[in-house]
Image: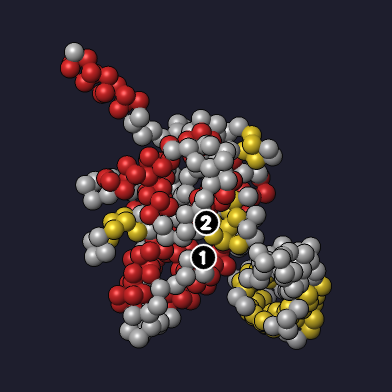
Amino acid sequence: MSAALLLAVASAASAAEPRKPSPLKSGIEFTGESARSLQSDDFANPGMLWVARGERLWNESAGRGGKSCAGCHGDAAGSMKGVAARYPKVDPGAARLIDLEGRINLCRERSQQAAPLAHESDALLALTAYVAHQSRGMPLAVTVDWQNRADFERGRELYHRRIGQMNLACTHCHDRNWGRNLGPETISQGHGNAFPAYRLEWQSIGSLQRRIRACYYGLRAEMPSYGAKDLLDLELYLAWRAGGLPVETPGVRR
Amino acid sequence: MLARVQLPPAAKRGEVIEVRITIQHPMETGFRYELGGKPIPKNVINRLVARYNGAEIFSAEMGSGIAANPYLSFFTVADASGEFLFEWVDDEGNRGEEHATLTVVA
């Protein structure tokens, strides 16, 4: 009897195994021709304005430390190549999960002795976009191990939990119904590989956290505040789920 | 105000070249309200002028219908090596400028 129970538990567990959509498709494949051509043209892509601003900030010294990012990390083209593809990750010093924005702010506090930049501020978006841009074309590759296993499982649970007045979970749109229409939109697989991305609806570049919050809003659920654990755990699960897709930062989305 | 200008690195004399500029600007339409219900005043780049070695070759008057971070492109004939100067002003009176140099060969 216990063997049967064990079998039942085992099969239930395998049914809930995290799965990636197949085939993996970046969000750009679900947008229209105009957004695609905007993203592929490095001059017309408005997100590149933030990348250009980020390059300036990278070389400017800040805070009481009087250091610039370049002072420690040198040329970002070499030192930051591939970095964005491995975030979010657990920072050994802070002993918690952080995303790229969080890592930049940790650097500001520790090395530059400067105040952290506010979420969605132009400066933080610019620096994040610039750093992530150095990994463009490289496949997302977060590893799930003992350090971040609990965060990952929590992210997976949140991804599958029904929320809001619409009573839907992420999975209902982005696993079961991608490629189908929701009003005038085509539902994407919900990958974050283009973020920070320029969203035409926002008329600005924005972080992945802002995009996830927009989904909460659409579900008429209470939005977690920026930097909340829920958003970080979701970011980790999404990064794992998009594993193998190339970084597109700065992407262009509707 | 941050802007990016794109010219071909070099051109032949008499060649038709494309000149492109993007400017980081919210282009606030004046039709939006903040969360408290107060209208957000209109603030768009209302005029942009491009000069090629001092002579005005292109200008644009923009309004609420232009998207944020405007992107403009036009064509001109490469006469001589020199400087392209772009100047613009928004409704709040903020001015911006950016320049780029063109090398014309033979």
Give the x, y percent position of residue A5: 23, 18
Amino acid type of the residue tagged 1 in the rendering: Glu
From the viewer's side, name the closer residue of B28 and A24: B28
Amino acid type of the residue tagged 2 in the rendering: Arg
Q: Circle 1 marks a residue in which chain?
A: A
Give the x, y percent position of residue A117: 44, 72
Quadrant of the image occupied by residue B8: bottom right
Pointer 2 residue: A210
Residue positioned 58% across, 33% down in the render: A179
> Horizontally, is A174 left or right of A91 in the view?
right
Q: Quick check: marks 2 and 1 in contact, CB under 8 Å?
A: yes
> Horizontally, is A166 left or right of B30 in the view?
left
Q: Label 2 neighbourhood size at 10 Å, few (<14), some (14-19), many (20+)?
A: some
Residue positioned 46% across, 76% down in the render: A57
> Horizontally, is A95 left or right of B78 in the view?
left
- Tell me if I can see residue B16 in this picture: no
From the viewer's side, name the closer residue of A119 and A26: A119
From the viewer's side, name the closer residue of A220 and B84: A220
Residue positioned 47% across, 54% down in the render: A224
Give the x, y percent position of residue A184: 69, 39
**Disc ID at residue A120:** 1
Q: Earlier in the sequence, mark 2 or mark 1?
A: 1
- Asked if A26 appears above or below A179 in the picture, the reply is below
Quadrant of the image occupied by residue A182: top right
